[in-house]
Amino acid sequence: MILSASIRRLLAALTGLILLLMYLPLAVVVLNSFNTSRSLTWPPPGLTVDWWQRAYESDGAREAVLTSVQVALASTAIALVLGTLMSIALQRYEFFGKNSVNLLVILPIALPGIVTGIALNNAFRGILSLQLSILTVIIAHATFCIVTVFNNVQARLRRMGGSFEEASADLGAGVWTTFRLVTFPQLRSALLAGGLLAFALSFDEIIVTTFTAGAGVQTLPIWILNNLFRPNQAPIVNVVAVVLILLSVVPIWLAQKISGDTEALR
């Protein structure tokens, strides 16, 4: 379909406006992290890196970053294992209730975060009688991180087909040998992309974390929320928010690049 020049200009203008509304607030946060004014006046009267040094020296901020990284790495590792196994089972085998299981695997990413958080809180405290801790946060994050790995691996398995695995089995290779030498090498880029997306998803999650974290557990998003309205902490919060943006955007960019490079090779 060929669009007229006026329609193309209108679409370009709308696209630019939407992108501006999406990313201008992020640019303001980045600029405010260098603002010399503690009250975050606009426009900034000057620029400084003092807030970055203070944020680095803040024990609370550093502990929150470390906690978020630990949770993200652990939940991503769980998601890589379980997501891969479930995608192989649902893509390569036929069994009763297959479609229902597929829906149940994907459902956590579609449910509102507050619903997932309340459900997990009730499960941990009411049914399992578990004390909320960093372990419950990891389990909670893994429930939705699995979906990103599952979707990436399942899409790759569909494109691969089963001919190579069948040939490996015909040549006498067992299930593990076939997976190690045939299936896994073709899944590596999909696993890496899914793992990066899962890490980014876990790192900036706040709603589910709020319902599943114990009193002594403070991830980076929760730290930001708790200090957001404290005047003395406002500039440091902006610095930490910039770090959070970078640690969320970089994995997503790498995952997109990996996926794009893989598609180009095919």
Image: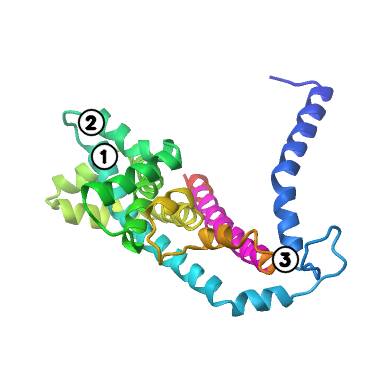
Q: CA distance from mark 2 to mark 1?
A: 18 Å
Given residues 100 and 112, the one toward you in this image is 112
> The residue under label 3 is which amino acid type?
Ser
Given residues 172 and 244, the one toward you in this image is 244
Query: Residue 162 — which label?
Result: 1
Marks 3 and 1: CB-CB under 8 Å?
Answer: no
Give the foreground label among 3 and 1: 3
* Magenta stretch: includes residue 67: no
Image quarter hosting the N terminus: top right
* Residue at the disc numbered 2: 98
| Magenta segment main secondary structure | helix
On screen, 229 above or below 55? above
Query: Residue 193 — which label?
Result: none
Residue in view at x 69 percent, y 69 percent: 232
Rate crowding at label 3 as few (under 14), some (14 to 19) or many (20 or more) other CA atoms within 10 Å.
Answer: many
> The residue under label 2 is which amino acid type?
Lys
Give the foreground label among 2 and 1: 2
Marks 3 and 2: CB-CB under 8 Å?
Answer: no
Q: Which residues are magenta?
A: 236-259
Under tag 2, what secondary structure? helix
Rate crowding at label 2 as few (under 14), some (14 to 19) or many (20 or more) other CA atoms within 10 Å.
Answer: some
Residue in view at x 84 percent, y 57 percent: 42
Q: Is residue 57 left or right of residue 186?
A: right
Q: Where does residue 3 sit, x and y in percent of width and height?
A: 75, 21
* Residue at the disc numbered 3: 33
Under tag 3, what secondary structure? loop
Of the image marks 3 and 2, the number of the one nearer the N terminus: 3
Rate crowding at label 1 as few (under 14), some (14 to 19) or many (20 or more) other CA atoms within 10 Å.
Answer: few
Q: Where does residue 58 sit, x and y in percent of width and height?
A: 58, 76
